[in-house]
Amino acid sequence: MDRAIGVIDSGVGGLTVAHELMRQLPKEKLIYLGDTARCPYGPRSKEEVQKYTWEMVDFLLTKDIKMLVIACNTATAFTLDDLKEKLDIPVIGVIQPGARAAINFTKNNQVGIIGTEGTVRSGAYSYALKKIKTDIHVTALACPLFVPMVEKGILSGEHALDVISDSLLPLKKHKEMDTLILGCTHYPLLKDTIQKVIGEKVTIISSSEETARETSAILDVHHLLNKAELPPVHEFYATGDLNIFIEISRSIFKEANFHMLTIKKANITPNQVS
Ligand code: DGL
């Protein structure tokens, strides 16, 4: 049996990355875990995010995954280096791929980034961007109201427009910005409204495409690509209520892919996983 790619997120946001992985790597089986019971991670301390992320990883390791994709910016910001060092499977996060994509798109080196408080506080995007290009100008803004809205299934409409308009006001004043990174995996679900608010002149980058491309390259280099001919059945888990998780999964994957998922509840308790 070919082994699966493990994908973790604090909730439903990583489904946008899983969707792109399924599109680019249709032969690969995914095992996704969303920690919806403890979402959001954004306002939590570094130590708490590290602890919860490791608990998710331990759950996926019991399923013998061949690679780990951290489809959560906050978890990437606080745990990527540690996971890379301690796991003996390839590990990839979403921050570097997002930063690389932004560098490709910006024409004037004026890049904005929106994310959770944790991601913005960590400075991980600025670090990743400046490591590639030293003269890049980065404006980072935390948008703490977006994730709770997405987790409730509110992805468009008047309320979403009001919240997004108010939250992005500080960025709208920054007239030169030509590229905006959605530095949170929940935000692509709000992309249309964000684009409307920020204006068509700004290129919006979500790291999912780039992350999927890098995942594919890493699997190839490690000779881990799946050779099976049959389409995979993906295992998706959430730690919290399954109803909204199923509803959002259905809207992201559409019927054509949704039927390829099994969705179950995962019970994760410290040092005891089932
Ligand atoms: N998935 C998280 C991220 O990409 C956002 C949700 C949260 O705060 O837990 O940063």
Image (cartoon, rainbow, N blue to C red):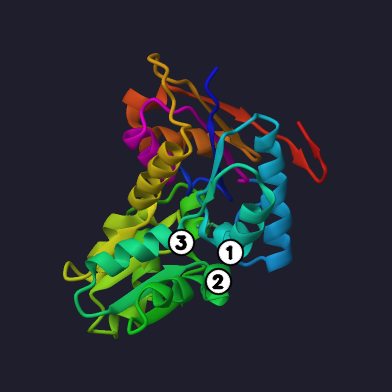
Residue 24: percent from the left, percent from the top? 32, 36
Mark linked to residue 117: 2
Q: Mark 3 points at which residue?
A: 95
Marked residue nearer the N-terminal end (2 or 3): 3
Marked residue nearer the N-terminal end (1 or 2): 1
Residue 230: percent from the left, percent from the top? 40, 14
Label count reads 3
- Residue drawn at 51 percent across, 71 percent down: 124
Residue 189: percent from the left, percent from the top? 37, 51
- Vertical position of residue 122 compared to residue 255: above or below: below
Note whether ligand 1 is within 8 Å of mark 1: yes
Q: Are marks 2 and 3 in contact (CB under 8 Å)?
A: no
Q: What element carries label 1?
A: loop
- In the image, which is nearer the foreground, mark 3 or mark 1? 3
Q: Residues within 10 Å of mark 3 (few under 14, many from 20)?
A: many
Q: Residues within 10 Å of mark 2 (few under 14, many from 20)?
A: some
Residue 181: percent from the left, percent from the top? 35, 66
User: Between 62 and 134, which is closer to the camera in this rendering?
Assistant: 134
For the C terminus, give its image quadrant. Answer: top right
- Residue drawn at 38 percent across, 72 percent down: 132
Marked residue nearer the N-terminal end (3 or 1): 1
Q: Does the magenta stretch include residue 184?
A: no
Name the residue type under label 3.
Answer: Ile
Mark linked to residue 42: 1
Name the residue type under label 1.
Answer: Gly
Q: What stretch is highlighted in magenta?
A: 17-36
Residue 54 in sight: yes
Note whether ligand 1 is within 8 Å of mark 3: no
Q: Are marks 1 and 2 in contact (CB under 8 Å)?
A: yes
Name the residue type under label 2.
Answer: Glu
